[in-house]
Amino acid sequence: MSPVELRSDTFTVPDEGMRTAMARAEVGDDVWGTDPTVHALEERCATLLGFEAAVYVVSGTMGNQLALRAQVRPGEELLCHEDAHIVMYERGAAAVHGQLTTRTWSADGGLPDIDRLRSLVRPAGYSPVRTALIAVENTFGSNAGRVVGLADLRQVRALAAELGLALHCDGARIWNAHVASGTPLSSYGEVFDSMSVCLSKGLGAPIGSVVVGSAATVAVARDMRARLGGGWRQAGIIAAAGIYALDHNIERLAEDHRRARLLAEAARVDPGAVETNMVFIPTPDADAYVAAAATAGVLVSAVSPTVVRVVTHLGVTDADADHAAKVLASLA
Ligand SMILES: *Cc1c(COP(=O)(O)O)cnc(C)c1O
């Protein structure tokens, strides 16, 4: 039996149906704006999330960075969580490419309380650095894929409107938040000025993310994508995988969430803390845990010296989950 892959939902590989859709995709030259499959994917995402426009990009990192740069000018500031993907994993891109400054908040979930958030925004006229944008990650990956709730997001929307800030969602796993909470995708869309959503995590496409926003924001993002060398030609071949993923793999995320809770119970973690497809397991020596699990045929990862992360996805069957549960129980 090959090892059970629980390190990330990025390890998913296209199934037969997805590969067939890719093989049959009608394509054009997307740099010339003539790839019908790319257009279809962009329109689909804009409609699903309730935005004017969308642009298909190579990665979630590129999606976030284009959205930030389209809405924050050099020397202006963005606010996000101290452990957000935007500051933890994007290699300082906001500073390197965008000349943006970043300030961060700490909070267990994805958001601090609204008064704390308000206190971080620099008041207009009192500082030469203008706070221009708030970025919220949903689900919040650095704390076990927690869902940021719509009521909290609406409070942030009101604050952003009052203070004239843009609001961006790093929605790499917005699909998981939608399925776990029952919140319509368009309700998330109503709250934000822009979103970056990944097709290559739990949805199972091999490559690709989409930025949605106003026509003006997306036009700037498209221009910057070209400047970074992100213009692509017969991209419909992979856009077809994205459309297939949206058609087939959103509702089934509930299965991943169910298996994650099962693994949490096995690992003696409160299943109530597992809202989506991630389990964080506290342990005295995360590296030793990872090595012992690997020896028993289960691949997990260490996210800190004392926390192990387990991620379920469409490549994990019930039989895989049962085997993994036994191994995690033996390590608990
Ligand atoms: C994966 C991920 C991204 C984007 O990642 P890429 O590897 O660049 O596609 C952005 N935000 C979060 C929260 C993610 O998990």
Image (spheres, grey):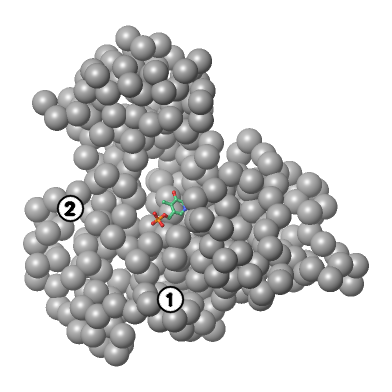
Q: Amino acid at mark 2?
A: Pro
What mark, if any, has residue 228 been given in the picture? 1
Q: Height in image: 206 above or below 283?
A: below
Asked if the residue at label 2 sits under 8 Å from ligand 1, the reply is no
Q: Earlier in the sequence, mark 2 or mark 1?
A: 2
Quarter of the image where the N terminus is located: top left
User: At x 51% / y 30%, what residue is drawn?
Assistant: 304
Nearer the observer, 135 or 104: 104
**Viewer-nearest of labels 2 and 1?**
1
Residue 232 vertical placement versus 186 (above, below): below
Quarter of the image for residue 289 reads top left
Residue 276 appears in which quarter of the rendering? top left
Whether residue 270 is visible here, answered yes or no, is no
From the viewer's perspective, tell me whether residue 129 is left or right of residue 125.
left
The answer to which quarter of the image holds residue 63 is: bottom left
Q: Residue at 67%, 39% (x, y): give it.
A: 107
Judged from the image, the secondary structure of the residue bearing numbered disc 2 is: loop
Residue placed farthest to the right in the image? 126
Residue 12 marker: none
For the C terminus, the quadrant is top left
Residue linked to disc 2: 14
| Residue type at numbered disc 1 | Leu
Q: Can the viewer see residue 230 in this picture? A: yes
Reply above or below: 122 against 29: above
Q: CA distance from mark 2 to mark 1?
A: 27 Å
Q: Position of residue 285 (x, y in %)?
A: 47, 18
108 is higher (above) or lower (below) than 69: above
Task: Pick the residue in front: 225 or 67.
Answer: 225
What x and y, as percent, mark residue 62?
Answer: 44, 65
On the image, the x and y values in percent for residue 212 come to: 46, 70
Provide the secondary structure element on which disc 1 rests. Answer: loop
